[in-house]
């Protein structure tokens, strides 16, 4: 595993540092643009720095970078946040009692998580081509069975 990660640049501190510095430069440019467009003000949303983080990770893992205005990147962020937010309560209960996903899927956030996972999978398939070559994707039931 260590050699494989080195092949992708993880063992080379300089390349990761350059990637992070380049992305931070884009962030500064984006902030400058907002300041100019909003009379010296900048709007910080809850997810302001998440786009930068996603771009850094995408650059390290897939070698790609998105514009902050990219609709696919915005959807990926929304799906990621929805997946994590709705897994906080329901994930533990669903792991212990998998049948509950049929009893009260909305209350446990199961349906939202599945839609978010579908969106993330589609992004990986279409935008990045990350899932090409995989013959099958595990079903929810197979994933739950792995936890037993």
Image: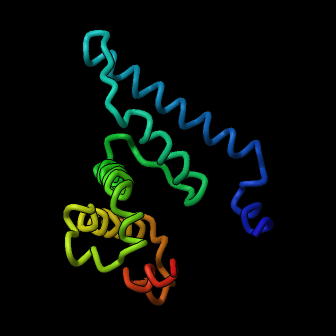
Q: In this picture, is 28 found above or below 36?
A: below
Colour pattern? rainbow
In the figure, is residue 14 to the left or right of 44? Answer: right
Residue toward you, 34 or 42? 42
Q: Quadrant of the N terminus?
A: bottom right
Relative image position of residue 99 (x, y in whole percent): 30, 80
In the figure, is residue 111 to the left or right of 73? Answer: left
Do we see residue 126 in this rendering? Answer: no
What residue lies at 49% left-to-right and 71% top-to-bottom?
130
Residue toward you, 115 or 16? 115
What residue lies at 44% left-to-right and 26% top-to-bottom?
29
Relative image position of residue 53 (x, y in whole percent): 50, 42
Q: In this picture, is 21 found above or below 33?
A: below
Do we see residue 98 in this rendering? Answer: yes
Q: In this picture, is 35 found above or below 70?
A: above
Looking at the image, the residue that sits furthest to the bottom is 135
Residue toward you, 66 or 144? 144
Residue toward you, 42 or 70? 42
Q: In this picture, is 110 found above or below 143?
A: above
- In the picture, residue 42 is in which quadrant? top left
Relative image position of residue 85 (x, y in whole percent): 34, 51
What residue lies at 27% left-to-right and 74% top-to-bottom?
101
What residue lies at 40% left-to-right and 20% top-to-bottom?
32
- In the picture, residue 68 is in which quadrant? top left
Relative image position of residue 13 (x, y in whole percent): 76, 44
Q: How many marks?
A: 0
């Amino acid at each position: 595993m260590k050699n494989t990660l080195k092949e992708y640049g993880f063992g080379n501190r300089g390349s990761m540092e350059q990637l992070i510095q380049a992305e931070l430069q884009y962030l500064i440019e984006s902030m400058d643009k907002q300041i100019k467009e909003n009379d010296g003000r900048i709007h910080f949303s809850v997810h302001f720095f998440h786009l930068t983080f996603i771009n850094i990770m995408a650059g390290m893992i897939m070698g790609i970078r998105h514009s902050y205005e990219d609709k696919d990147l915005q959807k990926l962020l929304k799906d990621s946040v929805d997946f994590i937010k709705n897994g906080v309560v329901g994930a533990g209960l669903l792991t212990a009692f998998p049948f509950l996903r049929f009893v009260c899927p909305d209350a446990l956030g199961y349906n939202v998580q599945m839609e978010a996972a579908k969106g993330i999978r589609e992004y990986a398939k279409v935008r990045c081509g990350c899932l090409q070559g995989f013959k099958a994707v595990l079903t929810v039931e197979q994933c739950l069975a792995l936890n037993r």
